[in-house]
Amino acid sequence: MEDLIVNKVANSGLVNIDLEDYYPKGKRIQIDIKSQLFQELILREKDFRIWIQSHDWNQYKDAYVAVFCSADAIVPVWAYMLISAQLEPLAKRVVFGDLETLEAELYKEIVDNLDVSEFADKRLIIKGCGNLPVPRAAFLMLTNKLRPIAKSIMYGEACSTVPIYKSVN
């Protein structure tokens, strides 16, 4: 008699969800305006406007852009608005913050718009480790969205899951 290899995971009824499957493709760029400040402390409007006019904004075409200042300086809101006005017609998305903030914002939109009806009353595994920079916040957002409808939620891989939630019904 032949030894058959049986895929117990496939037969278990577990549904795997990999947040990397939803990762928006495209270049990520951050703009740190620290280098545009006088002595990394003060924003001079005239100098800043010259930089705005002379900067090559086309490099951000179809990119996801995070705009922030890493210096401990007071930057007026209008400075970020000037940058945003230049980026809006070119970039796919512009956010205030660093790249981690950008990824969280992208995933917020993804999870908010995700049709989770196919996961109702299912035993779910949200895949953990991966190769793309899926923000930790995305795992929380997805858990919050799935909890009201899922039979159970686990984290990790089918061979080693961590239980997160189990319905009492």
Image (tube, rainbow, N blue to C red):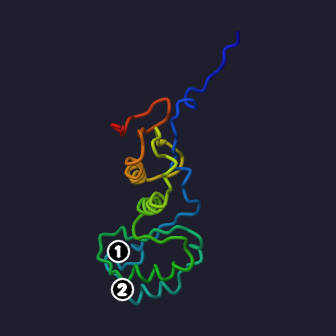
**How many numbered callouts?**
2
- The residue closer to the viewer here, 40 or 169, is 169
- Compared with 21, 103 (above or below) is below
Amino acid type shown at disc 1: Glu
**Measured from the top left, where is residue 16 in percent x and y?**
52, 41
Q: Residue furthest bottom?
A: 46
Q: Residue at x 52, y 46 (%)?
A: 18
Q: Residues within 10 Å of mark 2 (few under 14, many from 20)?
A: few
- Compared with 150, 22 (above or below) is below
The quadrant the C terminus occupies is: top left
Mark 2 lies on residue? 44
Q: Residues within 10 Å of mark 1 (few under 14, many from 20)?
A: some
**Measured from the top left, where is residue 65 in percent x and y?**
49, 69
Amino acid type shown at disc 2: Arg
- The residue closer to the viewer here, 43 or 4, is 4
Mark 1 lies on residue? 40
The quadrant the N terminus occupies is: top right
Q: Residue at x 41, y 47 (%)?
A: 149
Q: Residue furthest right?
A: 1
The alpha-carbon separation of the residues under discs 2 and 1 comes to: 11 Å
- Compared with 160, 84 (above or below) is below
- Left or right placement of residue 74 versus residue 96 in this view: left
